[in-house]
Amino acid sequence: MSGRKLRVVLAEDSVLLREGLVAVLGRFGHETVAAVGDADALRDAVSAYEPDIVVTDVRMPPSFHDEGLRAAVALREQRPALPVLVLSQYVQRSYAAELLDSGDGTGVGYLLKDRVGQVEQFVAGLTQVAEGGTVVDPEVVRQLLRRRRDPLERLTPREREVLGLIAEGKSNAAIAAELVVSEAAVGKHIGNILGKLGLPQGDGTHRRVLAVLAYLRA
C-alpha cells in the first residue's frame, strides 16, 4: 500500500459511521479535511478543500434515495480527474454504471458497506482509487452484468417471432395472417414485448421503432 497521506472529503449522513470512517482513515495516516452529512455540503467541501479523494454514501438527505451517488457523478463531470469512492448498502445500478463510465473510467470505486468492516481491504481500495485505479465490489459487477444482458432474453419464443416480423415492417394484420392467429392475440404479444423491454409509454409507432432497435442490437 502506498505511504502517501491522502486528504479526504467524506460524506455520510450516519454520524456513527462517519466518525468511525474518520477514525479508520486517521489510523492509516490519512486526513479527513471535511466530514459532511448531505450532498450540498459534499459539493461545497470539494470546492473548498480540493481533496485527493472523495468518499461518499449513496443515500443522503433530504430524500435518502441516491443524492450522494448523483453528487458523485456530477463531481466527476466537473472534475474528471477527481478520485471518487462510493459506499452503499445496495447497488443503485443506473447511476453506478454512469459513475463507472465517468471521466476516463479511472480513479473511481463502488463498494458495498459490508466491505468497510474489512478495514485493511477498504483502505487498500481507497488508496488504489486515489492513485487512479478502479475498485468495484463483486456484487456490483454481478448486478451490472445482469443489467447489460441481452434485453430480448425475457421474451418468449413467440414474442421473439412477433418482434422479428415487426422488424420486417409488417402490420398487426399481416403478422396475424402469417402466424394464423387473431389480431387481438398479436396486439397482446406486442404489449408484452414492449413491457418486457421496459419501453416508455407514449406513441405506439415510436415504441415499435424502439423495440425494433433493441431487436437489431441483440
Image (cartoon, grey):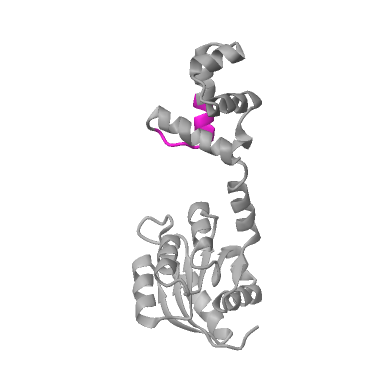
Closer to the camera in the image, 125 or 122? 125
Q: Position of residue 84 (x, y in %)?
A: 50, 71
Residue 9 magenta: no
User: Relative to 2, is 210 above or below?
Assistant: above
Residue appearing at x 65%, y 73% in the figure:
121
Side of 44 where 156 appears, left or right: right
Q: Position of residue 214 (x, y in %)?
A: 54, 38
User: Relative to 53, is 113 above or below?
Assistant: above
**In the image, farthest residue toward the front:** 168
Side of 46 where 20 appears, left or right: right
Closer to the camera in the image, 78 or 71? 78
Quarter-of-image position of residue 67? bottom left
Quarter-of-image position of residue 138? bottom right
Q: Position of residue 25 (x, y in %)?
A: 54, 81
Residue appearing at x 53%, y 18% in the figure:
186
Range shown magenta = 191-201
Residue appearing at x 52%, y 68% in the figure:
104
Residue 199 magenta: yes
